[in-house]
Amino acid sequence: MFGQDSSQILYPEDIDRLCAVFEAVCDRYRILPDPEAALDLAADLVRLFQSGMTGETALRIAAEARLTEPYRLAG
């Protein structure tokens, strides 16, 4: 786990991890940094991280799952 309390504070190493996942998912799904989809992705990553999901692979998989069609239709 990164930071001292991932549910409250994001430390520089936490931000670095989230940025790496954000960039990887944006590259894979061709999401530009400006549109609403990118903002939604960033917010999802922070929520996932603060709920205790701190591993880069787990964050990437969860973020990508949220971008799939069944999730979008259900959510």
Image (tube, rainbow, N blue to C red):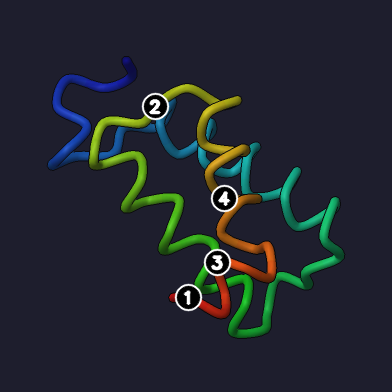
Q: CA distance from mark 4 to mark 3?
A: 11 Å
Query: Label 1 crowding class (10 Å Cα cut-off): few <14, some 14-19, many 20+?
Result: few
Position of the N terminus, as image quadrant, is top left
Left or right of residue 71, residue 48 in this image: left
Front: mark 4 or 1: 1
SS under mark 1:
helix
**64 or 18, which is in the foreground?**
64
Which circle, 4 or 2, is nearer the viewer?
4
Q: Residue at x 57, y 50 (%)?
A: 63
Mark whose residue sits in front, 1 or 2: 1
Find disc 2 in the rendering and name its residue.
54
Depicted 55 relative to depicted 20: above or below: above
Residue beneath disc 3: 71
Give SS at disc 2. loop
Image location (x, y in percent) of residue 29: 82, 60
Q: What amino acid does circle 1 point to?
A: Ala
Work out which quarter of the rendered image holds the C terminus and state it: bottom left
